[in-house]
Amino acid sequence: MTEKTRIVLQYHDVIEGPDVDASGFTGTAAASYKLDVRAFAAHLKAIHAVGIPAPRSILDSVNEPPRIAVALTFDDGGKSSSSPIADLLDEFGWIGHFFITTSRIGTGGFVTREAIVDLHGRGHVIGTHSVTHPVRMSSCRTPELLREWRESVDCLSSILGTEVLTGSLPGGYYHPRVSRAAATVGLKVLFTSEPTTRTQLVESCLVLGRFTLRRNSSAALAAALAAGQRWPRFQQWATWNLKKGLKRLGGPTYLAARKLLLR
């Protein structure tokens, strides 16, 4: 491990009960990222047992991270953000980063404006996950990218009465245009889905990768990633790069094939 390393774990929704469509986006693909509440609680306990510094706001370590800084992120803005996710984080005194798809605010399965204010008041970080959650954001033209970031940031800033400085990339398709547009609208940190601890500064925006935890991910894996163990990080990196090649070759065909396989 490098002397100073940021480990960012990427989660989505946490479901109580059998209805996987109760929070966040619906469908088989989205469900593959949704953890049962008991599994998620086990993840947090396992991460805590590793003895790493408590997950805090990534903004606290933008300029000078500690030896290892761990951050927990939650994409989409499903209604599980408040409960059970934030409730469980609060038990440990940990900070979560919640990235909101602003066109979905107040719709079925997603957070309300009041819930966003509540999360912010509890000390959690609120960031943008775009307006419409494009499936392939890397294929968007610059004006569209600027609109997705600017309108979502303006919406969240209006709700919170404060600047929104963080965002996460929906869909996993990254291109430098995405982070340049994010920097243009004032974002200071942008999270991708690439499993890496390497960082890059695109204009004034720090771009960070994340390690993804899915429905079938074990608590032991979450703890190993949080501890910075090399082998699980390499496994995710290798799988990601294989998929990246397939995505580049397949384009929309890759997405269609993935949907069929998940079914």
Image (tube, rainbow, N blue to C red):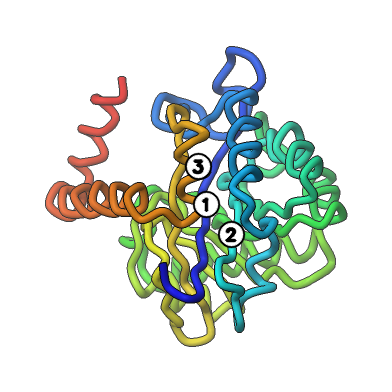
Look at the numbered discs 3 and 1 and tell me whether their residues touch, using CB distance below 8 Å. yes
Q: Residues within 10 Å of mark 1 (few under 14, many from 20)?
A: many
| Residue position for label 3 | 222
* Residue kind at label 1, given as amino acid type: Ala
2 or 3: tag closer to the N-terminus: 2
Name the residue: 47% across, 29% down. 215
Q: Amino acid at mark 3?
A: Ala
Decide which of tag 1 and tag 2 comes sooner along the chain. 2
Q: Say left or right for 41 vs 2.
A: right
Q: Amino acid at mark 2?
A: Val
Instruction: Please say if the residues under marks 1 and 2 sit with CB atoms less than 8 Å apart.
Output: yes
Q: Which residue is mark 1?
A: 226
Residue 145 sits above or below residue 249 on the image: below
Q: Which mark is residue 70?
A: 2
As measured in the structure, the alpha-carbon distance from the residue carrying label 3 to the one carrying label 1 is 6 Å
Q: Is residue 126 above or below residue 62?
A: above
**Quadrant of the frame with the N terminus:** bottom left
Residue 152: horizontal and vertical position, in percent?
62, 61
Marks 2 and 3, how far apart at CA: 11 Å
Say what secondary structure mark 2 lies in.
Answer: strand
